[in-house]
Image (cartoon, grey):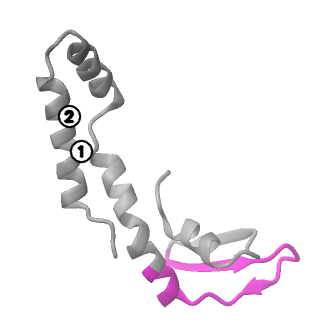
Amino acid sequence: MMIDRVTCIHNLYSDVVNVTKNLETNTYKAFDKDNKEITLDMNAVEAEFAKLDYQTKRMKEYPSLRDLADAMYWNSKGDSSKLTTYYEACEKVKTDNPKPS
C-alpha cells in the first residue's frame, strides 16, 4: 500500500470517513460520519507522512518476488549466489530508505 497524506489523515483522526483534496491549492478537508468538517493539523499530517514514507520508497525499490522465487529454486539446487544477491539488494533498499527512529 502506498502511503499518502489521506492515509496519514485516517491514521491520525479515527473519526474521519471522507477526505477531499483541492488540487489547485493542494489542501485537504476531512469530514466525519455526519459530514461535519474536522479541523486538520497539517503539521501533524506531514510529520506522519515523513514517518511512514520510507515504506512507499522501499516498496518501489525492493527486488521482485519473482526474483526471490528464482533465487530460492537455484538455492535448492546448490547455487546460493542468486539468493545472496537478492538479500544484498534488499539490504541496500533498507539502508537507502531507513526506518525513522
Q: Position of residue 94 (x, y in %)?
A: 25, 55
Q: Which residues are magenta?
A: 24-47
The residue singled out by tag 2 in the image is 86
Tell me the SS state at disc 2: helix
36 horizontally vs 56: left or right: right
Q: Is residue 77 above or below residue 99?
A: above
Question: How many neighbours does mark 2 have within 10 angstroms: few (below 14), some (14-19), or many (20 or more)?
Answer: many
Q: Position of residue 84 (x, y in %)?
A: 15, 32
- Amino acid on which the number 1 mark rests in the picture: Cys
For the image, the number of numbered tags is 2
Q: Is residue 25 above or below residue 74?
A: below
Taking the spot 21% from the left edge, 18% from the top edge, the residue there is: 75
Taking the spot 32% from the left edge, 21% from the top edge, the residue there is: 69
92 horizontally vs 40: left or right: left
Please state which of residues 53 and 77 is positioned toward the viewer in this rendering: 77
78 horizontally vs 22: left or right: left
The image quarter containing residue 90 is top left
The image quarter containing residue 101 is bottom left
Taking the spot 47% from the left edge, 61% from the top edge, the residue there is: 3
User: Disc number at residue 90?
Assistant: 1
14 horizontally vs 92: left or right: right
